[in-house]
Image (spheres, rainbow, N blue to C red):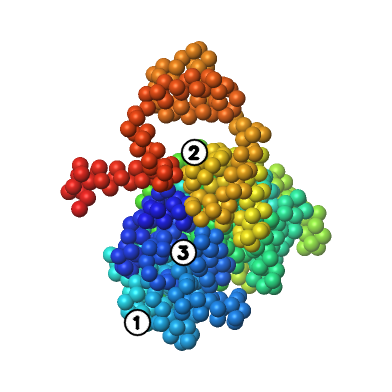
């Protein structure tokens, strides 16, 4: 298992839950796995397939996701194909021939394929080791993305009685989880569930001020040259915002279902290949996207459910590096979405959607830890994040009494006979010279101009607060503002109105976000090489190596195959395919610009200059000799000590190195490289030495 993990996938160890899930699959058990995005779901079904006879059938909802997964597997030397409507008939026929001739390890298909009797009959002629249902929340009618074609997968157990079914999703409440199990006929004991917690995401929510353009620009300045998604509610909004951002010097593209297929495919490909950094999209974009180096997700309006929201922000930071999210909301978001729900017939489903929308809005305005709130929604308990959400970062929340301003707003609505919308009311309050106001004679009202001390944006925040307090509502037919009994209580000073001070100002800094990757010249050179190779192989750049892997390469600069294999994300297949180019670049970088020495290296250098030997340095610094040896090597490579000094320091250790161990290692190196010897030593310790000491624990 560990050999395949390293050689095929490039990893030295499993993430939480992965190993147990893989063992369940190898034992041919049905399984539902619920893991947050970025936790390595795909590895859970890809690795055991390499240890089993037959082919895995992966059912996935989107062509783009299937293409990414197939490309990633093929780069790792694994024969995977997809049958889809994006292929020609000839391509699909060739794939089917490979399947029937047992040449495939993975076949990716959409759920719609299972209504095709010809396809089903062909599957029954093949040795299938297990089925994989990705994005399994689509099975549940209580889920946020229910699809009827997914629901029909309940018949898998009838069509293929002896074939295990494994289902995967990142988002499932306990209700959705139960529905998935019932529909797919998976035993309720066969569930592996991680807590809904993304500890590499900063989660923020801000009251949207005006058209939010200033807030968006400030946020984007924090993410210079980084990949990100901006979600808008409508197609027109995506186009307007994309055009505005391009005028401001950003390079963006609008993406929505109204574009031609060719246009959407080009934008998607450019984004995957890093030639386009920012996409401004409706929710038509992104489900199942496998791009690992998305650094931010920004919502310009509130999603309809927390499931939608958690899945959408989950597209950031899939590689585990720090990433950033921002939700811009207003009360109007909730109101506009309620209008659509109002039109549905009365049912349990309608009540459920109302409740999900209410919880989403409460999350947006909440002052509690956002990570904790999301986990609670999904039925999990976690500690406060402390430093990864705006509410935990802004510990000193200041509330302002805006009762007087609220009274001014309500009075203006009443003086204007409840016939106008918020923009007009704010213009009257601020003493606008607009012709319309003079035509109606509202410049003669006592309230005209009494709100000039506040900006339009600030009055907009007060309007939202009054909507939130249910002092106002918007007429569904005409869009005019109406007052409620709560508004009358405010006018009579029977009720006060307080607002979070930050809702009245635009945040000028998002400094809490700190990049994990040090985008220095070394990192950029590695990224350029990755881009060149991705174009040559016609695959997305992140499929060659993730940013996380590039970051480790930039820090360690391996110069031989053994060192390169020590990098997380580098396996035998990728070493064989890309090792030569990357190792050459690393050697060139080392020769031209040695990396800056760290503080600990410099402390060791000072002691060397004082004439101390390695044993004395270890004692002085309370460090192991292996650590000091690595310091000596680094100092030599950076021309801080010469070869004579290096040999003088290391010679006593060379002389005293145990001869039997040296001989044993030399014999081992005739059979394996140092990397494999090191890995097998660790395995030996756990498999044999540990077993001897604790036989009862290793039965």
Categorize mark 1 by other alpha carbons within 10 Å: few (<14), some (14-19), many (20+).
few
Decide which of tag 1 and tag 3 comes sooner along the chain.
1
Residue for badge 2: 395
Viewer-closest of 609 and 166: 609
Categorize mark 2 by other alpha carbons within 10 Å: few (<14), some (14-19), many (20+).
few
Disc 3 secondary structure class: helix
Viewer-closest of 341 and 671: 671
Measure the alpha-carbon separation of dots 3 and 2.
Answer: 28 Å
Disc 2 secondary structure class: loop
Q: Nearer the viewer, mark 1 or mark 2?
A: 1
In the displayed structure, does residue 29 sit left or right of residue 246?
left
Residue for badge 1: 158
Q: Relative to 642, is 239 above or below?
A: below
In the displayed structure, does residue 224 sit left or right of residue 597?
right
Residue for badge 3: 356
Could you tell me which residue is drawn at 35 percent across and 38 percent down? 664
Disc 1 secondary structure class: helix
């Amino acid at each position: 298992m560990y050999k395949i993990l390293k050689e095929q996938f490039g990893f030295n160890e499993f993430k939480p839950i992965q190993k147990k899930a893989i063992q369940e699959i190898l034992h041919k058990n049905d399984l539902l796995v619920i893991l947050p995005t970025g936790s390595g779901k795909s590895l859970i079904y890809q690795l055991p397939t390499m240890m089993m006879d037959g082919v895995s059938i992966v059912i996935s909802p989107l062509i783009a996701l299937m293409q990414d997964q197939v490309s990633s597997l093929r780069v790792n030397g694994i024969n995977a194909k997809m049958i889809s409507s994006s292929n020609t008939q000839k391509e699909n026929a060739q794939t089917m021939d490979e399947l029937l001739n047992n040449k495939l390890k993975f076949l990716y298909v959409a759920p719609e394929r299972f209504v095709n009797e010809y396809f089903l009959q062909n599957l029954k002629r093949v040795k299938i080791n297990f089925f994989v249902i990705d994005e399994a929340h689509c099975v549940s009618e209580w889920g946020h993305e229910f699809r009827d074609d997914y629901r029909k997968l309940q018949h898998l157990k009838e069509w293929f009685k002896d074939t295990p079914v494994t289902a995967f999703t990142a988002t499932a409440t306990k209700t959705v989880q139960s529905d998935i199990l019932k529909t797919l006929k998976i035993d309720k004991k066969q569930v592996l569930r991680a807590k809904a917690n993304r500890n590499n995401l900063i989660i923020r929510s801000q009251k949207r001020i005006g058209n939010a353009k200033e807030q968006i620009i400030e946020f984007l300045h924090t993410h210079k040259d980084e990949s990100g998604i901006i979600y808008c509610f409508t197609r027109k909004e995506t186009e307007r915002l994309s055009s505005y951002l391009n005028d401001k010097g950003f390079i963006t593209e609008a993406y929505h279902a109204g574009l031609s297929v060719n246009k959407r495919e080009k934008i998607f490909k450019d984004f995957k290949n890093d030639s386009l950094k920012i996409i401004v999209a409706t929710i038509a974009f992104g489900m199942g996207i496998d791009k690992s180096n998305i650094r931010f997700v920004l919502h310009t309006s509130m999603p309809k459910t927390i499931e939608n929201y958690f899945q959408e922000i989950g597209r950031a930071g899939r590689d585990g590096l720090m990433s950033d999210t921002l939700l811009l909301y207003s009360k109007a978001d909730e109101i506009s979405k309620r209008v659509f729900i109002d039109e549905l017939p009365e049912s349990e489903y309608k009540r459920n959607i109302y409740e999900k929308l209410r919880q989403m809005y409460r999350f947006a305005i909440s002052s509690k830890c956002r990570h904790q709130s999301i986990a609670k929604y999904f039925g999990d308990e976690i500690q406060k994040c402390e430093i990864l959400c705006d509410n935990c970062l802004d510990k000193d929340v200041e509330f302002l009494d805006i009762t007087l301003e609220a009274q001014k707003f309500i009075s203006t609505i009443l003086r204007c006979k409840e016939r106008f919308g918020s923009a007009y009311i704010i213009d009257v309050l601020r003493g606008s010279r607009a012709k319309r106001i003079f035509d109606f004679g509202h410049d003669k009202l006592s309230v005209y101009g009494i709100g000039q001390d506040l900006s339009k944006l600030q009055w907009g925040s007060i309007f939202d607060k009054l909507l939130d307090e249910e002092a106002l509502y918007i007429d569904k037919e005409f869009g005019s503002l109406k007052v409620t009994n709560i508004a009358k209580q405010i006018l009579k000073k029977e009720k006060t109105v307080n607002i979070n001070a930050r809702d009245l100002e635009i945040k000028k800094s998002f400094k809490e976000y700190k990049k994990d990757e040090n985008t220095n010249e070394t990192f950029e050179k590695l990224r350029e090489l990755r881009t060149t190779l991705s174009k040559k192989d016609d695959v997305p750049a992140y499929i060659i190596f993730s940013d996380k892997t590039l970051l480790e390469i930039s820090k360690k600069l391996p110069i031989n195959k053994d060192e390169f294999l020590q990098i997380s994300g580098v396996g035998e297949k990728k070493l064989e395919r890309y090792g030569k180019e990357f190792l050459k670049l690393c050697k060139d970088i080392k020769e031209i610009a040695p990396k800056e020495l760290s503080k600990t290296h410099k402390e060791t250098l000072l002691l060397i200059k004082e004439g101390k030997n390695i044993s004395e340095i270890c004692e002085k610094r309370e460090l192991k000799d292996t650590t000091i040896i690595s310091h000596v090597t680094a100092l030599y490579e950076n021309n801080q000590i010469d070869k004579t000094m290096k040999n003088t320091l290391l010679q006593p250790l060379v002389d005293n190195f145990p001869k039997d161990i040296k001989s044993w290692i030399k014999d081992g190196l005739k059979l394996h490289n140092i990397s494999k010897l090191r890995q097998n030593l660790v395995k030996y310790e756990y498999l044999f030495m540990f077993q001897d000491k604790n036989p009862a624990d290793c039965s």
